[in-house]
Image (spheres, rainbow, N blue to C red):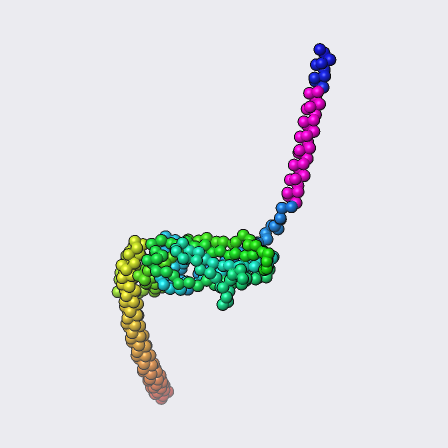
Amino acid sequence: MVAKTIYTRKMDNLRRLERGGKMRKLLSVASVLLLLAVFLTPIRVHGQAGPSFAYVWRGATYTGNDPFYNATVHAYGENTTAILSITIKADTAQLNVSNVRVVFDWENGTYNGTHGDRVISAENLLIIPPQVSRIVGISFTVPSTSFASNMYLHSYTIIVEHLNATSSPNEMLEPITKFASDFAVYSEDQADARDLYVRVQTVKTPTAKFNSSRAKIFVYKAENETSTGDMYYTQGDFGGAESHYNAALDLYSSAYVAEETFSVTSEDLQIKLIEAQIRNVESSASMVFSSGIALTLFGVTAVLFGIGYIIKQLAVLKKAGQKAATA
């Protein structure tokens, strides 16, 4: 019985050792596989940029903050031409661009890019050497607001596709994309209202810069019209906003005319005052000159009178002395 118990214990120890050995082998194999995975994984140098692109909208009806959408927008009037300029840059490897397009959220809103006078495609690659940039343009007609509403901003995605080689067999690599939702389609009234708003901001001048009280009153009224126009625009009443912005421009024009008239009148008064001062100075100078001559003549007369008086006194004294000598 004792011998059997000792045997059983030995067998259990052997089994535990075998299991431990298998576990160590599994751990060793896992470590080797992990190291292989690390070494075989492609490594990108820190700070090295991949293919990239930047874009800019050109010829927009308005670019900037729009209070109706409460956002910064790139806005085009309906049925006008929009131009998207895309600058694509390769990294350390050649970039084989097979397609550049922008996709909008409206129906048939996909527009392809061109380089020079040719449309870019898989059969007509745009090859960009390492560390070199190329500009791709996309031009299209903006739809009407009945097709692409002006009541909200439209989203779009710019897509740049590229291949791993210039000839077969080749395959498409992961495309470069950018998404935005800042494109506005303006109705005619909205475009006109925004244009008038920009002109008002250009001509308006703080009241403190006007000296004419009449001009300041015009400016005050123009500011009220501008604020009313802003309110109408924010509410989506673009025709009403247009009317108030027009009124503001007329009032600013009247303010400048009033200030100009006031300035001319003030200049005339100043010129007349200066002329009067000059005449006064000239009169004073003439009087001083005349007084100087009179004083000079008076001085000469006084001197002559003094000399005569002295001579007369000397004669009297001389005569008296002669009388005294005779006596």
Magenta: main secondary structure equals helix
Residue 101: x, y in percent?
Answer: 47, 58
Residue at 65%, 36% (x, y): give it: 30
Q: Quadrant of the C terminus?
A: bottom left
Residue 315, quarter of picture: bottom left
Residue at 69%, 33% (x, y): give it: 25
Q: Quadrant of the N terminus?
A: top right
Asked whether, in this view, residue 23 is left or right of residue 190, the answer is right
- Residues 52 and 138: in front is 138
Residue at 59%, 52% (x, y): give it: 47
Q: Is residue 6 visible?
A: yes
Q: Which residues are magenta?
A: 11-39
Residue 321, quarter of picture: bottom left
Asked whether, in this view, residue 34 is left or right of residue 223, the answer is right
Q: Is residue 225 visible?
A: no
- Residues 218 and 178: in front is 178
Residue 172, quarter of picture: bottom right
324 up-or-down from 281: above or below:
below
Q: How many numbered marks does the figure carry?
A: 0
- Residues 171 and 90: in front is 171
Q: Which residue occupies the extreme right position in the image?
A: 3
246 up-or-down from 275: above or below:
above
Residue 290: x, y in percent?
Answer: 31, 82
